[in-house]
Image (cartoon, rainbow, N blue to C red):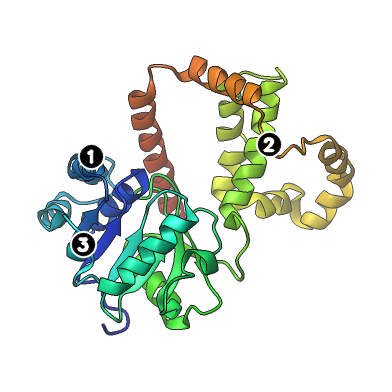
Amino acid sequence: MTGGALPRKVAVVGAGDIGCGWAALCASAGWPVSVFDASARGLERASQEVPRRTRALVALERATQGIVERGLLEFAQARSLLQAVQDADWVIEAIPEDVIAKQKLFESIEQVAANDTLFTSSSSGIAPADVFARCRRQDRCLVAHPLNPPELVPLVELVPAARTATSAITRAQDYLRSLGRMPILLKKPIAGYVVGRIAASVWRQCIDLVLQGVIDVDDLDRAVSLGPALGWAAAGPHLTYHLAAGDEGVTVFLQQLLASFEGWWAQLPTWHKLEPEQQRALIQSIERAYRGKIPELREARDRRLSAILRALEQSRTT
């Protein structure tokens, strides 16, 4: 392939929510995409889920119908790993978060893929050196971690390994930008990457507040989505606080509020394990808030995500 060229074909291995999301995203751009899953049931699900999610992007005004239908004409469910990977310029791994399974899969992919195929893993937190440990050609391998749903949320974390070539990073960035994604590049690997660590710390506090009886699940979710998350969508945490103190910026903010934050930090939960009874209590609280509403809630979430993205995009052009 020449630099900057679009992939002639994308292979997605793993037909869960993330894999179907990747396939829907590629198909929505009119790219030929093939999906393979070791489970016949998973592959059958993909045959329905990928077209549904791809066409949903048209209704959400995130894709155009003509390009979507062209992409779906070239969408295929592969019956073998060889059939999926053959002639692919980009292979996306999207199987469950099991390091041994990922290692074995990439070892198998390397045996049937072309020499210049780009390999990316959708891992949400495993070190890339571990994911690609059995690959002989680690120069073309890196993590490209999407957020769920991948066809809507534009951020993708790129996490190279020590042996990843700069050209592979550039190629991944080019592919992702061509799909309308916003890749961020981690300067070094860290467990959970950046997004996972932020999400884990915030969710621990959210879980603790529910389990301590401070607030119900639905009000907690509103507090986050209409509170800090809304401001962070527009500015991110550092810029939010930098702007909060007016023209003087974060220096004055720290002078005025650091003591308060330090007091709150000292009282934040530090546990690192949910005991079985805590898991049961959390599950009951979430199910009590949302039982029987999953399809409608998922559709509403996607509409809101699309509207937020549209507003952010319009504000950047004005």
Quadrant location of the N terminus in the rendered image: bottom left
| Residue position for label 2 | 273
Amino acid on which disc 3 is placed: Ala
**Vertically, is 112 above or below 100?**
below
| Residue position for label 3 | 84
Quadrant location of the C terminus in the rendered image: bottom left
Question: Mark 3 or 2 closer to N-term?
Answer: 3
Q: Residues within 10 Å of mark 3 (few under 14, many from 20)?
A: many
Q: Residues within 10 Å of mark 1 (few under 14, many from 20)?
A: few
| Residue position for label 1 | 41
Quick one: SS at disc 2?
Answer: loop
Residue at (42, 79) in percent of width and height: 136
| Residue 64 placement (x, y as % from top left) | 20, 51
Question: Mark 1 or 3 closer to N-term?
Answer: 1
| Residue 89 placement (x, y as % from top left) | 26, 73
From the viewer's side, name the closer residue of 22 and 251. 22
Quick one: SS at disc 3?
Answer: helix
